[in-house]
Image (spheres, rainbow, N blue to C red):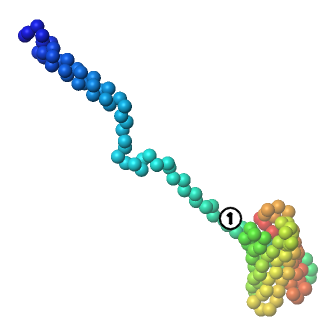
Amino acid sequence: MSKNSVFGFSVVRSSILATTVVGAALALTGCYVVPLNQQANQAPTTVYVPTAPPAPVTFAARLYPSNDLASSYGMVSAVVTNDLNGRGTFSTAINGENFMGEATRSNGNLRTGVANGSGNRGSYINCTYQMNSASLGSGQCKLSNGAVFTMHVGS
């Protein structure tokens, strides 16, 4: 080996190689990498899913006889469905007659209301009620024949 060689390379070649490596490193220090997938740099998309409106609430109601005419029918079950907008439906069956109608809260008062139904044989029922809580209440119902019931709403 000659005096001008290091590990089998000449000093001139080693200097050129070192200069090239240092120059390339210096040239790349001002660069940055551009991703090929441009969508990766986009802000995340926020998706808003509307919430479903509250579902109607159904309450069981029990009508207990309050006079002699009603006592012949015994205790009667009814169903009140509240659509949560101040209205609902009312249904019951008394002595084989099916009554269907509407329940409505009174003039913006969230605690009191009326429920009326007409029967499939021509009779009708009128009820007034007051809710003591969101799911419990009481009232009175009167059939078109004069039978009177005390109504309990809720479980």
The amino acid type of the residue labelled 1 equals Pro
Which residue, as the protein is rendered here, is positioned at the far right? 67
Figure check: 96 above or below 6: below
Could you say which quadrant of the image residue 6 lies in? top left
Which residue, as the protein is rendered here, is positioned at the far left? 1
Q: Along the horizontal axis of the image, is 17 left or right of 67?
A: left
The picture places residue 34, in percent across and down from the top left corner, at: 37, 42
Could you say which quadrant of the image residue 148 lies in? bottom right
Q: Which residue is mark 1?
A: 54
Which residue, as the protein is rendered here, is positioned at the far top? 3
Q: Is residue 60 visible?
A: no
Q: Around disc 1, counting alpha carbons within 10 Å, would you say few (fewer than 14), some (14 to 19), or many (20 or more)?
A: few
Q: Residue at x 79, y 83 (%)?
A: 117
Q: Along the horizontal axis of the image, is 91 left or right of 17?
A: right
- Camera-nearest residue between 25 and 59: 25
Q: Residue at x 15, y 14 (%)?
A: 11
Name the image quarter holding the N terminus.
Answer: top left
Q: Residue at x 23, y 20 (%)?
A: 18
Figure check: 131 above or below 37: below
Number of numbered tags placed on the structure image: 1
Q: Secondary structure at mark 1?
A: loop
Q: Residue at x 31, y 29 (%)?
A: 27
- Camera-nearest residue between 126 and 94: 126
The picture places residue 53, in percent across and down from the top left corner, at: 66, 65
Could you say which quadrant of the image residue 83 lies in? bottom right
Figure check: 8 above or below 35: above
The picture places residue 49, in percent across and down from the top left corner, at: 58, 59
Name the image quarter holding the C terminus.
Answer: bottom right
Q: Along the horizontal axis of the image, is 79 left or right of 15?
A: right
